[in-house]
Amino acid sequence: MTDTRVFHRSLRHTPSTAVRGDGVWLFDSNGRAYLDGSGGAAVSCLGHNHPEVRAAMHAQIDALAYAHTGFFTTEVAERLAERLVAEAPAGTSHAYFVSGGSEAIEAALKMARQYAVETGQPQRQYLVARRQSYHGNTLGALAVGGNAWRRAQFAPLLVDVTHVSPCYEYRDRHEGESVAQYVDRLGQELEDTFQRLGSDKVLAFVAEPVVGATLGAVPAVQGYFRRMREICDRHGVLLIADEVMCGMGRSGTRYAIEQEGITPDLITIAKGLGGGYQPIGAVMAQGHIVDAMARGSGFFQHGHTYLGHATACAAALAVQEIIARDDLLARVRRQGEGLMARLQARLGEHPNVGDLRGRGLFQGVELVADRATRAPFDPARQLHARVKRAAMARGLMCYPMGGTIDGRQGDHILLAPPFIISDDELDQLVDRLAGAIDDALQAQ
Ligand code: PMP
């Protein structure tokens, strides 16, 4: 048992105590510095302790920390929504503010369902999502997620969701199969799934434009999302893009889906929206969804106490204003290229690095026992967990993940440093990561 009263994820080990942050660095109570190479879990886009975000939060708290949305809107929530809508894909009309990613997914699923009911399609009830995805830990979000390990013991409590293949080129595109043929194959699978469930009974297809917490930054191949959109359109199925991790500039554009040239019906965002300064997430909704509810029952049958929390909105507004003012998306693209170049140079030929991938400052390293066969390591070795410990010992936070996922084992490391990371800090990140991988491998 831990010797603290905080219920930590591990009940056996108490983590170090974080006491201070400064830019890309976190410091613990022993004075040790950690380079935040993963932005926590792809959260801290502006780094830690940004003075302007702190000032904006202080000003909001001094005026009004919180007002319940059952009684009021607030200027700060309206300003944030206006900014987000203006920057979102064409047709987006509203932002629905919640407190995090899982809540955003829950709200999106219920919005999709209510839209179906309000538009005279109450028979639409089936959800389709992808294996090896993560959409959150509340029961609805966990059901949609395709991570067998996370779902296993809660399975009896989960609504039935049909999972199709992810778009995971490194492992799933067959030898000799072109990208176009791979897209055809995945498209056919979705088409067949919709047909099997009943074309008019499917409610929504949920997917992460760049897979994050299960595979470590896996973008789809070119043309994949266009095909998925076409198939959804043909069957009247809503497309929900989960950008909780890859959105808000992390992949080099405000929304990762912009790079795919399609428009989802609903987009969920969180993490980088508030940059960790406050818990906040949102559903960005297309006008036709909101209109249907406005014309129908006139309200969205959902709600939480902290919807549109004023201080959280103030933090997010400041974060998003700074990103725009300082042109940080261009910086994400530039530093992202720098990160990939360093990873290639340092790890590209490493015998246990199978794949380096990602977009912007959202990149992943997949470790393998054998590069030629792409054979993963024995899950019993828990290599990813060893990399995490070795990295912390070297003063680096990275986000390793792995274990047996849907019967397939893998060791993945996600990198998602703050957008403000410098060249020198990128050097240190890759240096420490390469050292940690070797430490972990040698410790076997
Ligand atoms: N969706 C995705 C794509 C995520 O990566 C996450 C969190 N890792 C969530 C949803 C859930 O977000 P939260 O942890 O804020 O509930």
Image (cartoon, grey):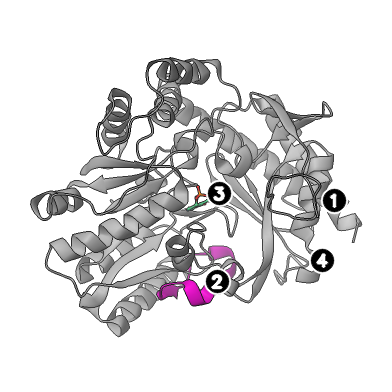
Q: Disc 3 or disc 4, which is closer to the eye? A: 4
Residue 343 shown in magenta = no
* Crowd tier of the residue under label 4, counting other residues whose Cα lies within 10 Å: few below 14, some 14–19, many 20 or above: some
Of the numbered discs 1 and 4, the one sitting upstream in the chain is: 4
* Crowd tier of the residue under label 3, counting other residues whose Cα lies within 10 Å: few below 14, some 14–19, many 20 or above: many
**What's the magenta region?**
154-171
- Compute the Cα span from label 4 to label 2: 25 Å
Q: Which residue is identified by label 2? A: 154
Secondary element type, mark 1 = helix
- Give the residue drawn at x 69%, y 49%: 8
Query: Percent from the top left, x then y, of residue 168?
Result: 53, 64
- Give the residue drawn at x 18%, y 71%: 122
Q: Disc 2 or disc 3, which is closer to the eye? A: 2
- Tell me the kind of residue under disc 3: Gly
Q: Which mark is residue 68?
A: none
- Tell me the kind of residue under disc 1: Asp
- Compute the Cα span from label 1 to label 3: 22 Å
Q: Which residue is identified by label 3? A: 358
Residue 161 shown in magenta = yes
- Compute the Cα span from label 2 to label 3: 31 Å
Query: Percent from the top left, x then y, of residue 164?
Result: 44, 73
Instruction: Using the image, determine if residue 167 lies above or below residue 286.
Output: below
Instruction: Using the image, determine if residue 353 lies above or below residue 43.
Output: below
Secondary element type, mark 2 = helix
Query: Percent from the top left, x then y, of residue 410?
Result: 68, 65
